[in-house]
Image: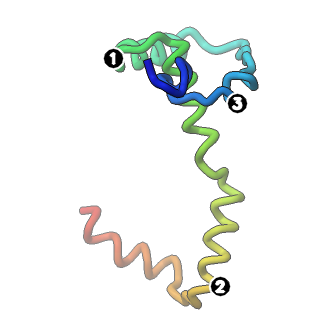
Amino acid sequence: MNPRGPLADRGESRQDAAMLTSITVRDVPDETCNKLADRAARSGRSLHEYLRSELIELARRPDAAALMDRVAVRVRRMGTTIEPSDVVDMLAPERR
C-alpha cells in the first residue's frame, strides 16, 4: 500500500476523493456505448474506469478558445509573421 494512502495508488489525492461527483449521460446511442465498451475491454479496464480516465484527460486539455488565446499571446510575444498558408505549404511535403 502506498504510504500516502489507498487513494494515492490510483493517482488520487484525499482532496480529489472528497470532491468526487457522479455524472449521468443520457441518450447515448448503443453503437457509441458498444465502441466505448470495446475500447475499455482492449485497455483492460471496466467501462467506468475507461470513461473516468478519458474525462479526466479531456478536462486537462485546454478548450479551443483557451488554446487560441495561448497562441495569440505567443504570436504577440515572439513577433511571428508567418502566414497560415505558408505553414501549410511547409508541412505539405512531410504529409505525402
* Residue in the image at 74% along x and 23% along y: 18
- Neighbourhood count class around disc 1 (C-alpha, 10 Å): few under 14, some 14–19, many 20 upward: few
Q: Mark 1 or mark 2: which comes first in sequence?
A: 1
Q: Nearer the viewer, mark 2 or mark 3?
A: 3
Q: Position of residue 63 (x, y in %)?
A: 66, 50
Q: Are marks 1 and 2 in contact (CB under 8 Å)?
A: no
* Residue in the image at 56% along x and 87% along y: 78
Q: Nearer the viewer, residue 65 or 78?
A: 78
Instruction: Give the spatial CA distance, label 2 vs label 3.
Output: 38 Å
Numbered circle sitting on residue 63: none
Q: Nearer the viewer, residue 34 or 66?
A: 66
Q: Are marks 2 and 3 in contact (CB under 8 Å)?
A: no
Numbered circle sitting on residue 76: 2
Counting the numbered discs, the total is 3
Which residue corresponds to mark 1? 42
> In which quadrant is the N terminus drawn?
top left
Q: Nearer the viewer, residue 82 or 13?
A: 13
Instruction: Give the spatial CA distance, label 3 vs label 1.
Output: 31 Å
Horizontally, residue 70 falls left or right of residue 94, namely right
Which amino acid is tagged 2? Arg
Q: Mark 3 or mark 1: which comes first in sequence?
A: 3
Q: Mark 2 or mark 3: which comes first in sequence?
A: 3
* Residue in the image at 34% along x and 71% along y: 91
Residue 33 in the image: above or below residue 14: above
Q: Are marks 3 and 1 in contact (CB under 8 Å)?
A: no
Give the secondary structure at mark 1: helix
Which residue corresponds to mark 3? 15
> In which quadrant is the C terminus drawn?
bottom left
Residue 91 in the image: above or below residue 13: below
Give the secondary structure at mark 3: helix
